[in-house]
Amino acid sequence: MGTFRLLLFLLLISMVSQAQDTIKVIRDTTSVSQIVKETKYYYGGYLNLTLGSYTSVGIEPLIAYKITPKLSAGAILTYEYISDNTYSGYNYKESNYGGSLFGRYRLFPQFYFHAEFSEMKYDNYHANGSNTHYWVPFLFLGGGFSQQISQNTWLNTQILFDVIQNEHSPYSGGVPFYSIGFGVGF
């Protein structure tokens, strides 16, 4: 079981951040030269896993298009399962889902600005056992750093702030959202 957890952990770490851009190499049959053509699409996503009395399992696949070499736009789908039994006698289980549209501008090859509008469905549980569904909007602004560490692997870090601060948001007080991980080319 320990080996399985280690392999699962390594898999999750390798996919935490966005995947690398794809490069196609085309051989010219009339000469030995190679023409390298870069695709305008990139894809990847995030996985999250928290285990214990509070368990969270989530996936966020993304696809983006390079409008220019420095500017890209994309979409993210999000699904998250939560089980929380940190309070005695109460076991809270929920499936959250939603989507995002984002834009990213590369100031330098490693540094980028990031803007993302997201909407997530959350349940608000009441003392009488009933619940209310809320679609909660977020507007994340921030930036990130991406460093190539091998041919197909990047180290990525990102910090985003929700500037809407909706009253139904499960997050409070302008706490930043951090993402740290590795991107691996597919």
Image: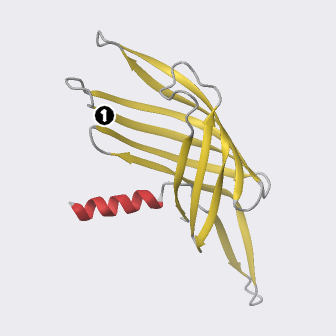
Expressed as whole percent of the image width and height from the top left, the position of residue 181 reads 51, 57
Q: Which residue is mark 1?
A: 83
Q: Nearer the viewer, residue 55 or 38?
A: 55
Please report the residue visible at 65 percent of the width from the left and 50 percent of the height from the top. Answer: 64
Image quarter of residue 13: bottom left
Expressed as whole percent of the image width and height from the top left, the position of residue 58 reads 42, 43
Mark 1 nearby-residue class (10 Å; few <14, some 14–19, many ≥20): some
Q: Nearer the viewer, residue 174 or 117?
A: 174
Expressed as whole percent of the image width and height from the top left, the position of residue 45 reads 53, 51
Image quarter of residue 26: bottom right
Expressed as whole percent of the image width and height from the top left, the position of residue 110 reads 69, 61
In the rendered view, would you say 140 is above or below 154?
Answer: above
Please report the residue visible at 43 percent of the width from the left and 31 percent of the height from the top. Answer: 96
Image position of 145 (left or right of 178): right
Image position of 85 (left or right of 32): left
Name of the residue lying farthest toward the top: 128
The amino acid beneath tag 1 is Ser
Q: Secondary structure at mark 1?
A: strand
Image position of 133 (left or right of 178): left
Please report the residue visible at 31 percent of the width from the left and 34 percent of the height from the top. Answer: 83
In the rendered view, would you say 45 is above or below 136?
Answer: below
Total label count? 1
In the rendered view, would you say 94 is above or below 167?
Answer: below
